[in-house]
Image (tube, grey):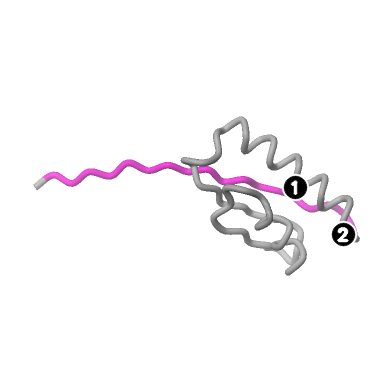
């Protein structure tokens, strides 16, 4: 799990990275001001390729890139 998270954290723009479901999924939260939607798609493919090259695991590992923006205002 540590190796999986290390791969995710090695990419530019990554804020947090979590290996979940016993290492079957890697969820990566990126900084929306640094990563565009298109870059997030490319990043997911590149992470999956690195995982395939650098790790041994049974089955498959799902890579999810989460790019979220929020706008909050308060009425007084």
- Spatial CA span between label 1 and label 2: 12 Å
From what the image shows, is residue 2 above or below residue 61? Answer: below
From what the image shows, is residue 5 above or below residue 48? Answer: below
- Mark 2 and mark 1 in contact (Cβ < 8 Å)? no
Left or right placement of residue 50 versus residue 31 in this view: right
Secondary structure that dominates the magenta span: loop
From what the image shows, is residue 55 above or below residue 13? Answer: below
Q: Secondary structure at mark 1?
A: helix
Q: Quadrant of the N terminus?
A: bottom right
Sort mark 2 into few (<14), some (14-19) or many (20+) by Cα contacts within 10 Å: few
Q: Earlier in the sequence, mark 1 or mark 2?
A: 1
- Residue at 77% x, 65% y: name it: 3
* Residue 23 x/y as whole percent: 75, 63
Q: Is residue 24 magenta?
A: no
**Residue 62 vs residue 8, the one in the foreground:** 8
* Residue 2 x/y as whole percent: 73, 69
From what the image shows, is residue 4 above or below residue 73? Answer: below
The magenta region covers 58-75
Q: Is residue 62 magenta?
A: yes
Left or right placement of residue 56 versus residue 5 in this view: right
- Residue at 70% x, 42% y: name it: 44
Residue 47 badge: 1
Q: Which residue is mark 2?
A: 55
- Residue at 56% x, 51% y: name it: 29
Residue 25 falls in image quadrant: bottom right
Sort mark 1 into few (<14), some (14-19) or many (20+) by Cα contacts within 10 Å: many
Task: Tally the numbered discs.
Answer: 2
Q: Secondary structure at mark 2?
A: loop
Q: In the displayed image of the protein, which residue is found farthest to the top?
A: 38
Left or right placement of residue 55 versus residue 6 in this view: right
* Residue 20 x/y as whole percent: 67, 63
């Amino acid at each position: 799990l540590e190796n999986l998270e290390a791969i995710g954290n090695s990419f530019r723009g990554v804020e947090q990275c979590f290996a979940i479901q016993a290492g079957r999924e890697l969820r990566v939260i990126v900084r929306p001001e640094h990563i565009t939607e298109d870059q997030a798609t490319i990043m997911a493919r590149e992470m999956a390729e690195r995982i395939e090259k650098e790790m041994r695991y049974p089955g498959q590992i799902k890579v999810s890139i989460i790019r979220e923006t929020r706008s909050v205002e308060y009425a007084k």
